[in-house]
Amino acid sequence: MGIITIKDIAKALNLSTSTVSRALRGSYEINAETKRLVMEYAERMNYRPNPIALSLKENRSRSIGVIIPEIANNFFSQAINGIESIAYNRGYHVVISQNHESYERELVSTQYLAQRRVDGLLVSLSGESNDLEHFKELQSKGLPIVFFDRVPQDYITHKVTADNFAGAYEGTEHLIQQGYRRIAHLTSPSWLSITYERLEGYKKALQNHGIPIDESYIKYCSHGGMIAEEVENAVLELIHHPNRPDAIFSAGDRLTTSCMSLIRKEGLRIPDDIAIVGFTNLVSAHLLNPALSAVTQPAYEMGQLATEFLIDLIERPKATIRFESKRLDTRLVIRESSLKSS
Amino acid sequence: MGIITIKDIAKALNLSTSTVSRALRGSYEINAETKRLVMEYAERMNYRPNPIALSLKENRSRSIGVIIPEIANNFFSQAINGIESIAYNRGYHVVISQNHESYERELVSTQYLAQRRVDGLLVSLSGESNDLEHFKELQSKGLPIVFFDRVPQDYITHKVTADNFAGAYEGTEHLIQQGYRRIAHLTSPSWLSITYERLEGYKKALQNHGIPIDESYIKYCSHGGMIAEEVENAVLELIHHPNRPDAIFSAGDRLTTSCMSLIRKEGLRIPDDIAIVGFTNLVSAHLLNPALSAVTQPAYEMGQLATEFLIDLIERPKATIRFESKRLDTRLVIRESSLKSS
DNA sequence: TTTTTTTATGCAATCGTTGTCGGTAACGTT
DNA sequence: AACGTTACCGACAACGATTGCATAAAAAAA
C-alpha cells in the first residue's frame, strides 16, 4: 500500500476528509472518540501529511533557501552547520544551493528557490554579483532575505558579517609587528563587501604604522580563486614584482591555499622569503606547511545569527523591524607562516 | 502584481486556463495566433509554471535527493559537484542533505525527501546505518535509489564505489616497500562497506609480503572521526602501543587530519617516527606538513556516474535492468608523509 | 442546403489538504 | 410546543497546472 492520504483514511473510516483533517489537528469540534479512531488509524497506516499539497495551499514550504558561492569552502560549510542547527530547531528545512561564484547560476538558483516557495533566503553573494535586482524584486514581493558574509551595501535588510575591517587590520598589523614592510594583499573581487572592508583594514594598518600603500601590491581575483589561472597570474606578478613583497595577506580558503602552493612551486620558502597570513577558516590550517597564521571568522555563529534573523522575519512579518547589521569578531591565530625568522 | 499564474493569463486574454496551458506547451490543436498571444503575454509577465502544483499533479519534482554524512568533506563536496554537473544537464535539481553520521538524521532526511517527492535518491550511508529498511521500503514503492561510496552489501540496485580494496592494497604496499613493517590501520565504523574493503586490501598487502596481521593495530572510529574523543583515543592507543607502529594507513579526511594533529601534539615526527598514508581526497594534501601521501578517489566521476545511473532508473522505470556495481580506480599520490628517512 | 469533418476552445476532474459554510440531531429553555 | 444552543460532521471550493472529453464554429463534402 503506497503512500496514504487523508482521503484514504476518510474512506476507510467512513468519514469526510474535512473531519479527518480536523481530527488530525485536534480540532475541538470533533468528537473525542472520532479523534481517537482517526489518530489511531493514521498512526497505524503511518500517515504523513503531504508537504507539497500544503505548500500549494498555504503558499509556503517551511523551508529556507541558502544561496552561497561554494560548499567546498570551510567558512561556508561551517556556516551551513550553524544555519541548520537553528533552522531544524525551529521547524524549518534547509535547501542549499551553490553557484560556484557565477552570477548566472545565482540568478537561476534564486528563481528556483522562490518558485519552490521557500519561506526566506539566506544569501552570501557570488563573486560576480553586482546587480541585485533579482533579490530586490523577491523581497518587494514579500520574501524575507538576510545576507551574511558577502553583503550588499545599499540594501535594506538584516545583515550578518564578521568584522572584516578589524580582522584585516589585526592580521596586517601582526605582519608589521613581525617586521615585514612590503606587505601585499591577495583578495576577492573588488566590488564585494568583504573585499572592501578587508582592504580598508589592511590599508589602515599600513597607514597607522607609516607604511606607504603600494597599489601594485593589491591583487583582486575576480572569481574568488575558482579560476586557477587568475590566482596564478596574481601570485606570479607578486613574486616577480620588481620589489618583491616579503609578506602576503590573503583572503579566502582557495586563494590562500593556491597562493601557498604557487610560492612553494616557485621555489620560495614561507615565511623566510614570503610570509603569509590568511583570512580563512581552513580547518587544517595548523597542519599546513608551514602552519598557517589565520584570521578566522565565527562562521557557525554567523550562520546561526543570520538564521535567527531570517526566521523572525518570516514569522513576524508585520512587526515593525529595525533592520540590523551585526558584526561579529574575528580571531587571529598566529602560527609559523607569519613569524619572522631572525 | 505578485507571482503570475496560468489563471491570470487566462483572465487577461479572455481564454480558459486549459487553452493557455496547451498554448504554452505548444499543443498542435491551438490556433497559431492564440498561441502567439499567450506566449507573448506569458513572456512579458515573466510567467513560470508553479513547480509545486506540478509536483502535486504529477507526483514528481524533477529533483533528486542526495543523502550524505557530511558536506565538509572533500570527497563528498567533490562528489556533489559531479552529481550537479550531470543532474542540471538532464533537467534535475539537486537537494542535499547531510546527517553528520547520524542514523536518526539519515532516517528523517530520507523521509523528508521522499515526502517532497524527489524522483530518486543518491545515498552514501551514515556511519551509524546498519538498518536499511527505510530505503528498502521506499524502493519497493518505486523510488529509485543508487548508492555510492558507502554502499550496502545485500541490496539490489546500482552501486558506484572506488576500488577500495585495490586502493588500500596499493597504499599499504607502498608503506611496506618503503620499509615500514609495523603498519596500523585507522578506519571508519566496521560495518561500512568502505571499511571492510579497505581493511581487506590492507590485510592482503601485509599477507602478500609476509607480515603478520596484528588486530591491535586496527582501530575503528564508529563516527568517522566526527567525535574528536574517539579518534583521539584510537590514535593515542596506537602511539602508546607497547610495540608502537611505525606507520599508519588512515581512512577519511577527518580521520587523517586528526591523526596527524595528534601525532604532532604528542611530539612525534612524521614520517620519522610514524609515517602516514591517508585514504582521502583532501585538496590541500600537498600543502600539509609533511605533504600527505594519499589514496584518492575519483569523487567527481563517482558522482557523475551515480547520477547517470539514477536518472536512467528514473526515466526508464520499466526497462528490465541489470543492476550494476561499478568500481572506479583510485590513485595513489606519494608525498613526504610516507617516505622512509634513510 | 444538408451532412460530415476539422479546428479551436471550454468544462470538469484531478493531485492532497484546509477553510468556509451549512446542516442535523440532541438537548435545554421558556 | 416552539425556539435557541451546542456539538459534531460533511459538501464544496480553493491552491496551480494538466488532460480527457464535450462542443461550438467553421470548413469541407455531400
Image (cartoon, coloured by chain):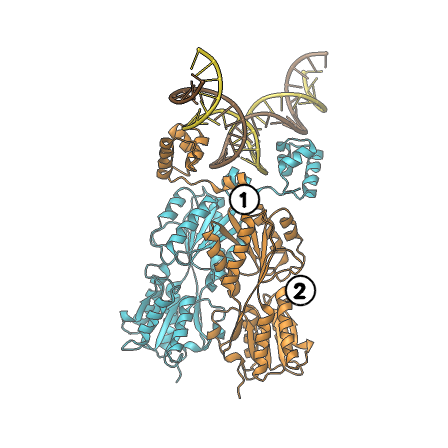
Chain colours: A orange, B cyan, C brown, D yellow
Marker disc for residue A60? 1
Q: Residues within 10 Å of mark 2 (few under 14, many from 20)?
A: some
Q: Are marks 1 and 2 on the same chain?
A: yes
Q: Nearer the viewer, mark 1 or mark 2?
A: 1
Tell me which amino acid carries mark 2: Trp
Q: Does residue B324 lie above or below B59 as drawn?
A: below
- The residue lying toward the viewer, choosing from B222 and B304, is B222
Q: Quadrant of residue B252?
A: bottom left
Q: Chain of mark 2?
A: A
x and y, in percent, of residue A187 in the image: 62, 70
- The residue lying toward the viewer, choosing from B195 and B242, is B242
Mark 1–mark 2 CB contact (< 8 Å): no
Tell me if residue A236 can be seen: no
Q: Which type of secondary structure does the marked residue at label 2 adopt?
A: loop
Spatial separation of the CA atoms under disc 1 and disc 2:
34 Å
Tell me which amino acid carries mark 1: Arg
Marker disc for residue A191? 2
Residue A115 left/right relative to A86: right
